[in-house]
Structure formats: C-alpha cells, structure tokens
Image: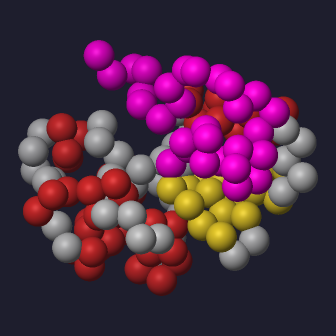
Amino acid sequence: MAKVIFYEKPGCINNAKQKALLWAAGHEVTAYNLLKTPWTVANLRPFFGNLPVTEWFNKTAPLIKSGEVVPENLDQETALQLMIQYPLLIRRPLIQVGDVCRVGFEKDKIDAWIGLASPKVIEDLESCPRIS
C-alpha cells in the first residue's frame, strides 16, 4: 500500500475512476484540487521529470483547443509560467508517492510503479469523455 497524493480537477469523471482504481489496489489516496493549489515552478516542475514539454499539457484545455497556447512552441520556463497562471493547462492527474512525482495516468506505468488491483482495465482514463 502506498500513500498517494493525487492532484485532480474536482468533478472530472476520469480522475474519479483513477482514484477508484488506486483505492481498490489498497492505496491511501489524498486528493487535492489541482486548480486551487498554489503552484510554483519549484513544486510543479518535478511532476514532469524528463518528459517533453508537449506531454506536460492537458490537450483538451480551452486555451490549447483554441490555439492560443501551442505546447510545441514553448520552452520549459514559459510552459511552467503558463500552467501556474492557468492550471487547466496542466495534464491530470499529478501523482506523488514519497519523493516520486508523475503526471498522467498510464495504467501500465502506475501498475509497475505502485501496483493496481485491475491493471487490465482497457478503458482510456486520460482523455476526457466529455470531449467529442
């Protein structure tokens, strides 16, 4: 069992399903509102590890869908400043267990990291089901 810190968008259907998988695996999940957390470069940057900047973003965020923010055109500092200003841009969830921080919910990676009760779930738990 792991103590999981889980930053979510309250009301997000997939975040609820992700937390349920973690609970079912016996993990202790403490959820926080990603949109209300006082993010800084220092506390946000660790979640992205060595991922390319384009993988840091919630591709369904209104600013991205409208073309106002183009992740492919951003450096790390600019990306982080935009995410701090507009937290909807942050890919969800942000997960922390101990000193290890990750972004997104790729079931196989989460299972290998801390274990899941039902790693064979085939449903997409990252893409927003409300987007057509």
**Depth check: 37 or 112 in front?**
112
Residue 111 found in image quarter: top right
Please indicate whether residue 57 sits to the left or right of residue 62 in the image.
right
Q: Position of residue 90 (x, y in %)?
A: 39, 55
Give the residue displayed 81% in from the left and 33% down from the top: 117
Give the residue displayed 78% in from the left and 46% down from the top: 115
Q: Position of residue 128 (x, y in %)?
A: 42, 28
The region drawn magenta spans 104-132
Q: Residue furthest top?
A: 132
Looking at the image, can residue 51 be seen?
A: yes
Q: Position of residue 83 (x, y in %)?
A: 33, 63
Count of numbered circles on the image = 0
**Depth check: 8 or 96 in front?**
96
Give the residue displayed 27% in from the left and 56% down from the top: 54
Residue 87 found in image quarter: bottom left
Give the residue displayed 75% in from the left and 71% down from the top: 98
- In the image, residue 108 above or below residue 79: above
Please indicate whether residue 120 sits to the left or right of residue 26 in the image.
left
